Amino acid sequence: MSLLTGLRRLSRALPLPPRLLHRLRRAAGVGFQISAYLRHGMGRKPARPTPGPVCVVGFHGSVLGIGEAARAFSAALRAAGAEVIDWDISALFGHDVRLDGGWSVTPPPSAAAFAIHLNPRELVQLMAMTGGVPFKGSFCVGCWAWELEEIPKSWRAAFRYVDEAWTPSRFVALAVSGRAPAGLPVRVLPHPLPPTTAERDRAAFGIPEDAVAVLTAFDIKSGFTRKNPIGAVRAFRAAHRKAPGPALMICKVAGAEAAPDLYEELKSEVGYAGDVVLMDQWLTGTQMAALTASVDIVLSLHRSEGFGLLPAQAMLAGKAVVATGWSGNLEFMTADDSALVDYRLIPVNDPQGLYGHGIWADPDPDQAASLLAALLADADRRRALGEQAAAQVAQRLDPVRLGRQARTWLGHGDFGA
């Protein structure tokens, strides 16, 4: 059992404060850096992209945003005709394996390239655990996302083990480029999204047919304050006062056990009025897609996003989306296809300790309520915005186009963009 796995299990068994747990993980990260150096050395011999099988490394079997990104990347490569091998390291890192896709739990004996969908600290841990043996002689890409304008200093060690860094948005690319070694390519490849087949099923989620349904969803482990669910609840209630009529907000929460005090804060804000429903049960990806298909509006009053998978998926499903107009979601959102909320930039203040310094957005609550109220009151407006969103996102995040772009960068030939 790895040290990080032990910390995860300890956090489940004991009510460790989030900041303490995060500090313990940071300390463990230093240990992995030392171990990776002792087993692998300061770096690796650079490799060039060549045609051949691509191994996508990630949490394929876990219900995590970063796991979803790895699965989508694999699917896009296959759609573009590449030979792909999926290496699922969920169990290796102590994550619950909830999905079964036939992924390999061991590295392939040979691959021309590795696309590693891990945060840099976890990439260093993987190098420490394997000694870098599976990656020897192969072209290695670090597929990284971050939510602030500067990446942590602790990421520097990970640059030693990749030939390129790929990011899902220009916002992340600028942050990574700021600390990348001279000459290391940093490219932008948005998360590809396949067409959705999910169907509306309000009965399955207890949503009244006559209500305008608004969805906000987040994982507490990804940052309670960053995701700003309390701001979303308040914006919905202010909007509902401006546009009275049957309306319901669903607040989908994952990882509540990771920060019970913050979850209690959210429950206290929601109260018992019945206009906001908390949903904390685990949903499969298919169920989450069905929930998104069953609502009318998706609301994301985030303080920062590296990309923003839920808004992208909602737009592809033809939903009207109200979102903070700052950070990685602007890779696929514009004022023509979304209701973007103005903001002011403020210093980061994160009780969980996931983000120690920097700035992020404070979305304008009054404007958020006004934009949302306009959509609550006008079904035609919701429909038109959703149709525009679906058309634009289908083109921007087309899996075949993005898979071909990835194949070009991996040395498989010039497929164009």
Image (cartoon, rainbow, N blue to C red):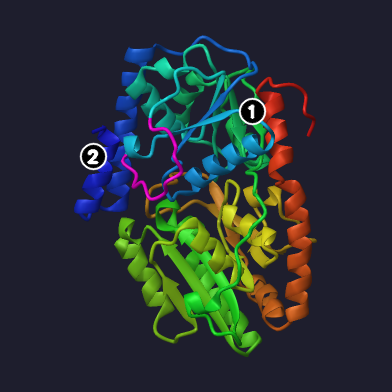
Crowd tier of the residue under label 2, counting other residues whose Cα lies within 10 Å: few below 14, some 14–19, many 20 or above: few
Above or below residue 99? Residue 279 is below
SS type, badge 2: helix
Query: Which residue is at 27% across, 46% downward?
Result: 20
- Where does label 1 land, which residue? 186
Left or right: residue 10 versus residue 206 is left
86, 176: nearer the viewer: 86
At which x and y percent is residue 340? Answer: 70, 62
At which x and y percent is residue 333? Answer: 71, 55
At which x and y percent is residue 215? Answer: 55, 70
226, 94: nearer the viewer: 94
Magenta span of residues: 94-105
Verify whether residue 99 appears in magenta.
yes
The residue type indicated by label 2 comes to Gly
What main secondary structure does the magenta stretch of the protein show? loop
Crowd tier of the residue under label 1, counting other residues whose Cα lies within 10 Å: few below 14, some 14–19, many 20 or above: many
Query: Which residue is at 49% across, 66% downward?
Result: 229
132, 327: nearer the viewer: 132
For the question of whether residue 355 can be seen, the reply is yes
- Where does label 2 land, which residue? 6
Query: Which residue is at 48% across, 75% downward?
Result: 205
